[in-house]
Image (cartoon, helix red, strand yellow):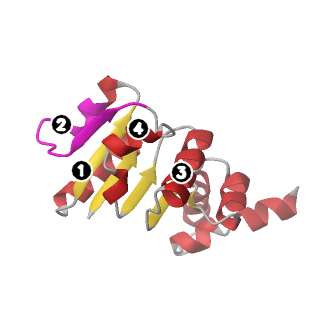
């Protein structure tokens, strides 16, 4: 499957290397050419310089034949906008956006864009460790915005 990843930071680069090791075709988009160094010299996927809300940049990355798209930049707005473009304009089947703000992640999920919040995952894992509880599933950690919303 061809997969497009927006963001070549620690998460995007690690994801790209894992997917490439699994035999997938990849394109990684980043606005900083230096970020691609995280992929190493043995990376065989395509690197595209640009921003993920630019449809021409997405086309250069092969979005039109992509089976999946992951927005992994540090910017919630860029991630959600590019994920919406990938899902709605290019009809990519599997789209996910990393969103730091747990309440925004939940709101976007309700709008039909799958999200993952590293803030919730990290806090939930720490909570379970501190309270000496077994770790839960990702879905259970992602449901934690309900707890946050009720505490305000």
Pointer 2 local density, CA inside 10 Å: few below 14, some 14–19, many at least 20: few
Query: Which quadrant of the figure has residue 46?
Result: top left
Q: Which tag is nearer the camera, tag 3 or tag 2?
A: 3
Closer to the chain start, of discs 2 and 1, is 1
Of label 4 and label 3, which has the lower sequence position? Answer: 4
* CA distance separating discs 2 and 1: 9 Å
Name the image quarter holding residue 143: bottom right
x and y, in percent, of residue 134 in the image: 52, 75
Mark 4 or 3: the one toward you: 4
Disc 1 and disc 3: Cα gap in Å?
24 Å
Q: Mark 2 falls on what kind of element?
A: loop
Q: Is residue 7 visible?
A: no
Q: Earlier in the sequence, mark 3 or mark 2?
A: 2
Q: CA gap, disc 3 to disc 2?
A: 29 Å
- How would you rate the neighbour count of disc 4 (Cα within 10 Å): few for under 14, some for 14-19, many for 20 or more? few
Which secondary structure, mark 1? helix
**Residue at image location 56% in from the left, 73% down from the top:** 139
Residues at marks 4 and 1, CA–CA distance in whole angstroms: 24 Å
Q: Nearer the viewer, residue 139 or 57?
A: 57
- Which range is magenta? 36-50
- Residue 132 painted magenta: no
Discs 2, 1 touching: Cβ within 8 Å: yes
Left or right, 99 with respect to 62, comes to right
Q: Residue under circle 2? A: 40
> Can you tell which mark lies on residue 17?
1
What is the crowding at mark 3: few (fewer than 14 residues within 10 Å), some, or many (at least 20)? some
Give coordinates of residue 56: x percent, y percent.
Answer: 41, 38
Task: Check residue 49 for magenta coloring.
Answer: yes
Whether pointer 4 and pointer 1 mark residues with C-beta atoms closer than 8 Å, the reply is no
- Residue placed under numbered mark 4 in the picture: 56
- Please tell me which of labels 4 and 1 falls first in the chain: 1
């Amino acid at each position: 499957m061809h997969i497009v990843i927006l963001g070549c930071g620690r998460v995007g680069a690690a994801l790209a290397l894992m997917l490439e090791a699994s035999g997938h075709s990849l394109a990684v988009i980043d606005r900083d050419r230096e970020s691609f160094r995280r992929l190493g010299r043995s990376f065989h996927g395509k690197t595209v310089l640009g921003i993920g809300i630019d449809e021409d940049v997405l086309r250069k990355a092969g979005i039109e034949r992509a089976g999946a798209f992951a927005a992994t930049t540090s910017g919630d707005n860029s991630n959600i906008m590019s994920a919406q473009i990938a899902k709605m304009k290019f009809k990519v089947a599997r789209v996910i956006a990393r969103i730091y703000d747990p309440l925004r992640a939940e709101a976007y999920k309700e709008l039909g864009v799958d999200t993952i919040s590293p803030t919730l995952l990290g806090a939930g894992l720490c909570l379970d460790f501190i309270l000496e509880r077994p770790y839960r599933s990702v879905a259970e950690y992602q449901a934690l915005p309900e707890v946050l919303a009720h505490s305000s």
